Every structure is written in C-alpha cells, then in structure tokens.
C-alpha cells in the first residue's frame, strides 16, 4: 500500500493544478453562498463524469477542460447521506481550519475525496 501513496499524492497535486484556473469563479460562488445565508460550508464537486450532486456552475463541455464543477453545501451532503451525522462536527472543524481555502469534493480515478485548495 505504501508504494501507491506517492502516486496518489502526485495525482492530487495534478488535480489541484487543473482546478486552479477556476478558482476566481468558485471563490465568488463560495462567497455568495455564505453572504446569502445559504450555508457557511460550501463544497464544490469537481467531476469528469455526470453527477447529480449540487448545481452545475462550470461544464467541461463548455470550457474545453476535463473538469465540471457543481456548487453544493455541507447541508446538502448530509441530506444526501454523503456525510454521516457522527462526522459532521469533524468535517466542520476540518473546514474551519481551511476557511480561506476552497473545499472540493473530487470524483476522479483515485476515488472520491475532499481536497482543500488555496483561494
């Protein structure tokens, strides 16, 4: 298992680089979600295949890239059973430790995982 970890770390770094061009739009959307009182915990779903999680804000078919991004929230993740009740406080603490970053839920060939990217 240890030999797979560097490969995964490299893939996460590559994903962060690929998402960077969208950071301004995603940061604006995150601020609007917070300012409008929708949620204090916006989550952006980055995906290459179709997903019904969140509301599409960037479509890969329109931007010529490989990523589509949907806007969602912790509350929606909880409602859709993507985060269990017993993990809510842990997630909020992790999120608050990265409050100046963008929270992505990335669906890729390395599985589904949360990635925090500097805004």
Image (cartoon, grey):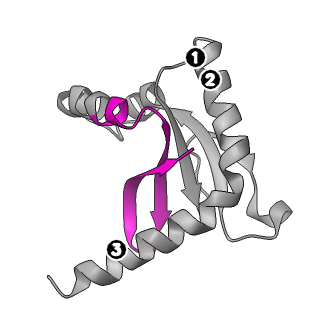
Is residue 102 a member of the stretch shown in magenta?
yes
Lateral position of residue 51 relative to residue 101, left or right: right
Which disc is residue 76 wearing?
none
Report crowding for label 1: few under 14, some 14 to 19, many 20 or more residues within 10 A (C-alpha).
few
Q: Which mark is residue 9?
A: 3
| SS assignment at label 3 | helix
Q: The residue tagged with tag 2: helix, strand or loop?
A: helix
Depth order, front residue of 106/13: 13
Q: Distance between the residues labelled 1 and 3?
A: 33 Å
Please name the residue shown 28% across and 81% down the image.
6
Precedes in sequence: disc 1 or disc 3: 3
Report the front residue among 89 and 82. 89
For the point 24% across and 84% down, the residue is: 4
* Image location of residue 85, percent across then percent down: 23, 27
Q: Is residue 49 left or right of residue 2?
A: right
Q: Quadrant of the N terminus?
A: bottom left
Give me the C-alpha separation between circle 1 and circle 2. 5 Å
Q: Which mark is nearer the camera, 2 or 3?
A: 3
The residue tagged with tag 1: helix, strand or loop?
A: loop
100, above or below 103, in the image: above
Q: Seen from this angle, which residue lies furthest right?
A: 62
- The magenta stretch is 94-119
Which numbered dot is residue 38?
1
Q: Name the residue under label 2.
A: 33
Residue 57 occupies which quadrant of the picture? top right
Q: Point out the tag, 1 or 2, that comes first from the N-terminus.
A: 2
Q: In which quarter of the image is residue 99?
A: top left
Magenta: main secondary structure = strand
């Amino acid at each position: 298992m240890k030999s797979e970890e560097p490969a995964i770390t490299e893939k996460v770094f590559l994903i962060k680089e690929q998402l960077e061009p969208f950071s301004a739009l995603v940061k604006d959307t995150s601020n609007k979600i917070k300012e409008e009182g929708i949620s204090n915990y916006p989550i952006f779903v980055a995906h290459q295949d179709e997903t019904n999680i969140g509301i599409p804000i960037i479509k890969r078919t329109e931007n010529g890239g490989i990523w589509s991004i949907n806007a969602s929230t912790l509350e929606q993740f909880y409602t859709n059973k993507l985060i269990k009740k017993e993990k809510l406080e842990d997630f909020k603490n992790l999120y608050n430790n990265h409050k100046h970053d963008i929270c992505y839920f990335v669906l890729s060939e390395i599985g589904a995982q949360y990635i925090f990217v500097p805004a």
